[in-house]
Amino acid sequence: MKELLYYQDVMLHEFNANFVSKGMDEAGRHYVVLSNTAFYPTGGGQPHDTGTLNNVDVIDVEKVDDEIRHYIQGDPSTLDGVVRGKINWSRRFDHMQQHAGQHILTAAFIELFNAQTVSFHLGSEQVTIDIAIDTLTEQQLAAAEARANDIILENRPIQTTWITENELVNYNLRKEVAVTGDIRLVIIPDFDYNGCGGTHPTSTGQVSAIKILSTEKMKGNVRVSFVCGQRVLAELAMRKKVLADVARQLSVPEIEAATALTKVLSVQKTTEKALATAKEELLTYEAKALVANSEGVVTTAFHQRTMQELQKIARLIVSDQSDAMTLLVSENEGKLQFVAAKGKNVTKSMKDIAAKALPLINGKGGGSDQMVQGGGDCMISKEELLLAMEKA
């Protein structure tokens, strides 16, 4: 492990190595094994590197037993003899920044609040750590973030060393190591000592910055989401774009966008409440008009009426007319929906009507003897469906 190129020189972009073997895994993926490699395999919460071997794309890297497999997208027969490897450096350095940032932020939470990190995930957009603590206040988050960024600004060296189990007593590790034999330590002097097999920059300054984005409860812990390095700038650019767009639509300066949006939402809530009241009144008038213009069963075929509206109209009709029965159908975007309801003095079961209507539209529905509803395909017209329901 000590001799692997990604440990020998973490800043290595390109390298030469000898072709050793090739194979295919159970999923049918081709891979090659080299005499040495600068490609980091997935492990310790850090994703694998990508890049090329002799211009053949490397799409995944895994350590399987004692060999590091480079999964390729191309013809493995073109790889033989001395192979030239090139790392996708923007991806690798991003992972290095995020991983080192995790070490720094984790150590800050321990130093300030004695709160240990119990898990770590390096995602494609954000990094998360789960911290063994019940709650974290905004003040605590701000303090940990500030301490982490102070360590970055101090540009402390990030050192690595290999030790044996017997030598562990010489280091103040923030958590017990889970490996035996040769143990790799990643050290930020006078701040963080940790067993880790990942890749990191050579100094804290290369992490650039850390920004905490959010927190959430997670199985008794607090999950902290954050970004480091170039991702901070990307996050800032995204949020700036969104804020500028919101401010433009509200016709206010960006700094006043939140206040203006609160006012808009308040007005919208009031407007929606007034509209709901007006709609309720309109449906009431509509139900009364349908009863007044009908003889016997109240039937109507609508266009673009929601199921909720059909149900509301039906209830209004039969609640005031104990001897009434109503059949309502609506065509909505290539689908047919219906409601059938009766007053308390009507003996006929509405389930009989649903049983007649549903097969005609290849539909599904349900309900009770008093009211049923259903919907299906426009295999017949809404007028034909209504007529069939009347005859049921």
Image (spheres, grey):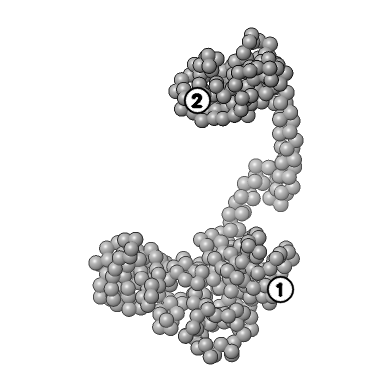
145 or 11: nearer the viewer: 145
- Residue 184: x percent and y percent? 50, 82
Label 1 residue SS: helix
159 or 164: nearer the viewer: 164
Q: Amino acid at mark 1?
A: Phe
Residue 386 relative to residue 68: left or right = right
178 or 368: nearer the viewer: 368
Is there any visible trace of residue 186 in the rendered image? no
Identify the image quadrant of residue 368.
top right
Taking 259 as reference, is 99 above or below it?
below
- Residue 367: x percent and y percent? 59, 29
Q: Please tell me the numbered disc located at residue 113.
A: 1
Identify the image quadrant of residue 24.
bottom left
Q: Amino acid at mark 2?
A: Leu
Give the residue number, with chain letter if any, for mark 2. Answer: 358
Taking 188 as reference, is 75 above or below it?
above
Q: What residue is rendered at 71% in x and 44% in y? A: 261
Label 2 residue SS: helix
- Which residue in the rendered view is the most extreme toward the top? 295
Q: What residue is rendered at 43% in x and 68% in y? A: 49
